[in-house]
Image: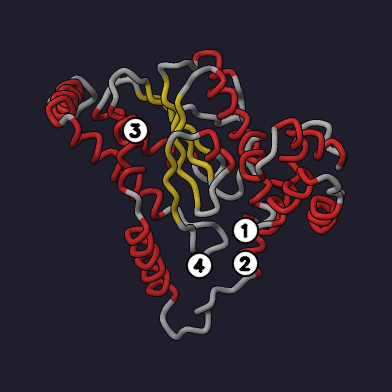
Amino acid sequence: MKTSEDLASRLRNSAVSAAERKLAAAFAENFPTSALGTVESLATRAGVSGPTVLRYLAKLGFPRFAEFQAAVMQEVDRQLGSPLIQMETPPEDAADEEHLYRRVLLMQAESFRRMADRAVPAEFDKIADLLADPRLSVKTLGGRYSRNLAQRLSLQLGQVRAGVSLLDQPLGFAYDPLLDIGPRDLLVIFDYRRYQGELLRFAEGARDAGARIVLLTDLWRSPIAALAEAVLTAPETSASPFGSRVVPTAQVEALVAAVVERDRDAARKRLARIETLRRYGPHDDEDADD
């Protein structure tokens, strides 16, 4: 199954039973993103059972569900997420006489306006409430192009509440942190095109361990959305070959502000303590040469 056309065609045309036809129809809508998710989410979308999904995929040559998801993710990368594809698709206003710098700034301003118009306050508040819950330890995790967002949230949130850590993966993806994840943990995942299979498998492991999950992703929604209690999406329109992370950065800052608003006294005391501790750090000694 070497091309996406092969995969899409077989998903559409191999259906025989009524249940298989329902699956084929669900897959055909907005393929390949329609084929991303867990067995349960795909079954719910198509109105069939989980075992029906697995039997149909096995019939198509995917004895393991993970193999099917890997094939679909490759197609997502090819169609939607590749920086090379982005370079080969010039922006609609490329012929605009505006200077590139001004055009990019206006493009981001439009992204913010669009997101403000479609914002769902209840979804944002759900994430903020979880982040502010002192009974939960917060762990942040990002992918290749979103690790900096996870790091930013961890750094800023850790200044205003306790129990925050970054699940850093600098030398390649590892699943060892799952050993210490459980029902008292909130896992905040950042996953944007190109979606990473490692992040999905990590999220599945964390959920199996009882952890709670929230997700920040793009408008196409990472398959991790099926595992999350709440999801924040953002456009990634950009003049560069790489998706923009300007709106997600603002979302991180808004979430930190919301946590502070939920307990300003606790945040103020923690920040004051940090300032006190900094006095013990390295400082210039005016008499060092005397």
Residue tagged 4 = 239
Question: Do tag 1 and tag 2 residues touch (Cβ < 8 Å)?
Answer: yes
Q: Amino acid at mark 3?
A: Leu
Q: Quadrant of residue 45?
A: top right
Find the distance from the CA under tag 2 to the CA under tag 4: 9 Å
Q: Any mark on residue 190, and which?
A: none
Q: Earlier in the sequence, mark 4 or mark 3?
A: 3
Q: Are marks 3 and 1 in contact (CB under 8 Å)?
A: no
Asked if the residues shown at circle 4 and circle 3 are in contact, with their CB atoms under 8 angstroms apart, the answer is no
Q: Relative to residue 39, is residue 193 drawn left or right?
A: left
Tag 1 secondary structure: helix
In the displayed structure image, the side of residue 208 where residue 58 appears, left or right: right
Count neighbours of disc 1 (C-alpha within 10 A) and say few if under 14, some if 14 to 19, many if 20 or more: some
In the rendered image, residue 105, in percent from the top left (x then y), is placed at 37, 68
Q: Earlier in the sequence, mark 1 or mark 4?
A: 1
Return the disc, 3 or 1, that comes first in the chain's sequence: 1
Three-letter amino acid code at disc 2? Answer: Met
Relative to 111, is 167 above or below?
above
Among the two numbered marks 2 and 4 on one chain, the one whose residue lies closer to the N terminus = 2
Q: CA distance from mark 2 to mark 3?
A: 33 Å
